[in-house]
Amino acid sequence: MSVGGAVRVPRADPAGRADRSAAARRAGRAGPTFALVAACIAAPWGYRGHEMAARAAVATLPSEMPDFFREAGPRLEYLSPEPDRWRSGTRSAMDEAWSYDHYIDFERVPDAALRAGDRWAYLSELYRAGLPRPERDAGFLPWRILELYERLVSEWRRWHRAPAGSDERRWIESRILDDAGILGHYVTDGAQPHHTTIHFNGWDRDTANPEGFTTDRDFHARFESGFVTAHVRPRDLARRVPARPRSIAGSAREEIFAFLLDSFAAVPELYTIERDVGFRPGAPADRRAGDFAADRLAAGSEMLAVVWWSAWLEGSVPRGGR
């Protein structure tokens, strides 16, 4: 799979590619430049971007959703950056378990893996394609989103069966909010083009670069954290996110992949804007740069409202019902 006409990268040749989780662990004993690179791994979109996206998504939820969910905006905002808080750099078992859920490198994913039905069938196809470390070399982002979505559907079904006002229903509500907040993190990550490509932090230096795109290793953090914090405001998302989410109930898997592929298609534009005008946190934002950043963050917020709403709808239909 290629990026908007860019040169195709051999899927099974990650030589020279930084291990994202290892990079984060090494940051503390490296120089300031390396620490900035690792920051892009430790806090995608920055806490502020994730929180803004969640806030805008909550504001569009239809009144048909239960009050406890629509009134939980502050909790959902807080939880949206939560998976980044788990990363310690020293607790290797935990870090390795979750590091690869934040991205997918579509260039390295064979078509058979894209057709897989679950994380493990996908991983088997990656091994079959010859990737030395498939979990690192391709990533699991669509599966993390789908797994959490399906968990929410299951929880909503149990919520409907639990007696109103019961402790059981309140406990399920707490579980729903926690999982919805965590889901928000990965959905919003998926709107950031860097999270869909081998060019995750500057153009891959082992790949042909006829357009002269930046290879700077501070690009990822500078765009999604520094630039967004400096130049994107909640009102920018509010006017971009539809007033009511559409439903993807019954087709979540296909829609999740389509959403991520839309982000992947935006990689050339991201790099073209960086080359032509730059994403500079400490300077006035060029309109192209500001609009692009707001559009991508709004795309994440829109999709987040869609998956929350759709999980509620799908979970409100009895298993096997229509």
Image (cartoon, rainbow, N blue to C red):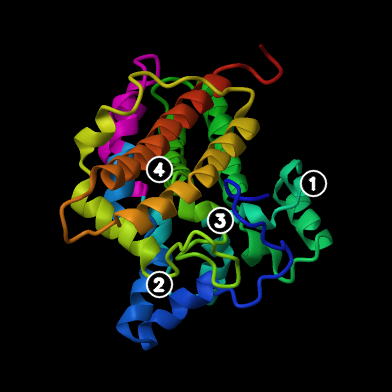
Secondary structure state at the residue bearing disc 3? loop
Numbered range of the magenta stretch? 55-80
Residue 151 locus on image (x, y percent): 57, 38
Secondary structure state at the residue bearing disc 2? helix
What kind of residue is marked 3?
A: Thr
- Left or right: residue 61 compared with residue 103: left
Q: Read off the residue under disc 4.
A: 181
Q: Where 126 falls versus 188 (above or below)? A: below
What kind of residue is marked 1?
A: Ala
Residue at x-position 47% and y-position 42%: 187
Q: Read off the residue under disc 1.
A: 112
Residue 197 is labelled as 3
Q: Read off the residue under disc 2.
A: 38
What kind of residue is marked 4?
A: Gly
- Distance between the alpha carbons at the discs numbered 1 and 4: 31 Å
Dot 4 alpha-carbon crowd within 10 angstroms: few under 14, some 14 to 19, many 20 or more:
many
Earlier in the chain: of badge 1 and badge 3, it is 1
Residue at x-position 45% and y-position 78%: 25
